Amino acid sequence: KNSDCPWLLRSPETSSFNLLEVSGDWSIWTGTITSGATFQTTCNACNSDADCNYHGICTDGMCVCEKDEPFDFPIYAGTHCEFSRPCAQLQGDEGDIWSVVPVDIDNAWKAYGRGVYMYTTGGNTTISEEDAYLLLYSGSRWFGAYFENGKDKGMESWQQFSRELHAFWDRIYTEDTLYVSDPTSRSDPIAVDFYEIGRRGAKYGPLGELMPLQDPPGSGYFECPAMNMTLRDFISELLDKQGKKG
């Protein structure tokens, strides 16, 4: 980590500018360097509607996801329309409420193709007006991260942050995260178990001491009370409330 070029995955020496042309054995760093790893890459462009999971149309190598008529609002999201419309508002078992963060009337803030949620009220949580308590996705898990003075940042700054987000490289997990989920590929954290992070150290592994939030285990922590509300309707209502509050 103190190297001028910290890396986790390294290719053989090459003069190619195209990653798809790089062949040979790669090296992986997992605490020690392991050589001889197989690494495959493919072009992320679509060639047919099948590459859009039949949830959209492949146009000039890009998926145009299916929309909800007559509102012209996407039902699916992601590079290959792989994510279904996320829940607009979450409610935890302790009564805590989390809402998607609107960018505009038609779009919510996303990280790794999934909506970013902000804690709004309820539960046993105390938060100052300047701080931001976010639920965001990185890698294969959801992270409940607390950012001091987070609300002082503009949306453009947050969006840039999420474009290059990595929970471990950015030390979000070790410095800001209070809760973490089980691995999941869902577009939202519904039906996923969450854990409060306790003590950290070699005894507890890379994620630390994990204390289940749900009872019984396997029941998931969040539900979706706004299941039947479209994301567009929810954002419109949320922006209207924020305007009246302001």
Image: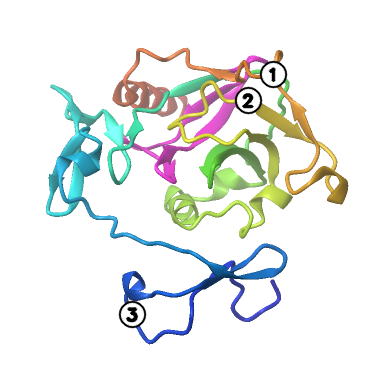
Residue receiving disc 3: 17
Magenta stretch: residue 21 in it?
no
Locate the N terminus by quadrant. bottom right
Residue 77 shows in the view = yes
Residue receiving disc 2: 193
Question: Horizontal and vertical percent for residue 8?
Answer: 59, 66
Question: Horizontal and vertical percent for residue 197?
Answer: 76, 37
Mark sitting earlier along the chain (3/1) = 3
- For residue 101, side relative to residue 66 (left or right): right
Q: Amino acid at mark 2?
A: Asp
Mark sitting earlier along the chain (2/1) = 2
Residue at 38 percent of width and 75 percent of height: 22
Q: Which residues are magenta?
A: 92-121
Quarter of the image where one finds residue 246: top left
Residue at 73 percent of width and 44 percent of height: 207
Q: Nearer the viewer, residue 78 or 236?
A: 78
Q: Nearer the viewer, residue 25 or 19?
A: 25
- For residue 157, side relative to residue 32 (left or right): left
Q: Nearer the viewer, residue 203 or 142?
A: 203
Quarter of the image where one finds residue 14: bottom left
Structural crowding at the residue carrying mark 3, measured as other residues with C-alpha within 10 Å and reported as few (<14), some (14–19) or many (≥20): few
- For residue 183, side relative to residue 177 (left or right): left
